[in-house]
Amino acid sequence: MGEEHQSNHPSEERAHGWDAVARVRTVILLRAPVTSGDRPVCDGGCGTRASACHSGGATRPDLAVALDLAPHPEGGWYRRTWTSPVAVGTPYGPRPSATAILYLFDAPGRWHRVRSTELWCRHSGPEADLVLGGDGPDPVPAARLRLGPGSPQQEVPAGVWQRAEPVGPGPVLVSCVVSPGFDVADFELR
């Protein structure tokens, strides 16, 4: 992320979170949302309260406001909630042994993959599918893992393309635990 600073405090996460350029097949600029005091404001630059903003075609859901979630580059809303204090060595440098985020989405997300294993834990909302796209250079939809009452947790192996899709109407709230912990250098987005 360009900085070694990690924080679980929402205002520090906004200040030090997604403020780097990720080197992926396509260079993607990821930036933290603008804030006005303790109130997040529109990430599209209009300056209105995020919960009332319609720029970019999406209004921040009430639950995203209540949980202090920021826009996520895959779509939806997120906040890092935990970073393990234990570091581990990886071929790409040291990482926390694990990290966790809350993630809220109500539409299909973008294809992405992470160099680490990701555990998805469904909390509320409709069921959702994790569409897996293999581990090749480009995603090729192959398998679906259902997040629902009978399977509230699903694992996505390291390096596998994935995208989340709600099965019914309304927002889906999940936690995503990544081990070794998430680092933007390990993230590829399509």
Image: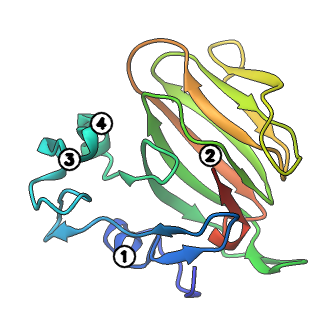
Q: Disc 2 residue type? A: Cys
Circles 3 and 2: CB distance less than 8 Å?
no
- Observer-nearest residue: 184 or 14? 184
Q: Secondary structure at mark 1?
A: helix
Q: Nearer the viewer, mark 1 or mark 3?
A: 3
What residue lies at 52% left-to-right and 30% top-to-bottom? 108
**Residue projecting furthest to the left:** 48
Marks counted in the figure total: 4
3D distance between C-alphas at marks 3 and 4:
19 Å
3D distance between C-alphas at marks 3 and 2:
27 Å
| Above or below, comparing residue 173 to residue 50 in the picture | above
Q: Position of residue 67 (x, y in %)?
A: 33, 47
Q: Disc 3 residue type? A: Ser
Q: Secondary structure at mark 2?
A: strand
Q: Which mark is residue 63?
A: 4
Circles 1 and 3: CB distance less than 8 Å?
no
| Above or below, comparing residue 110 to residue 38 in the picture | above
3D distance between C-alphas at marks 4 and 1:
20 Å
What residue lies at 69% left-to-right and 59% top-to-bottom? 188
Q: Position of residue 182 (x, y in %)?
A: 67, 64
* Residue matched to label 2: 176
- The first of marks 4 and 1 along the sequence is 1
* Residue matched to label 1: 12
- The first of marks 2 and 4 along the sequence is 4
Q: Disc 4 residue type? A: Leu
| Above or below, comparing residue 179 to residue 21 in the picture | above
- The first of marks 3 and 2 along the sequence is 3
- The first of marks 2 and 1 along the sequence is 1
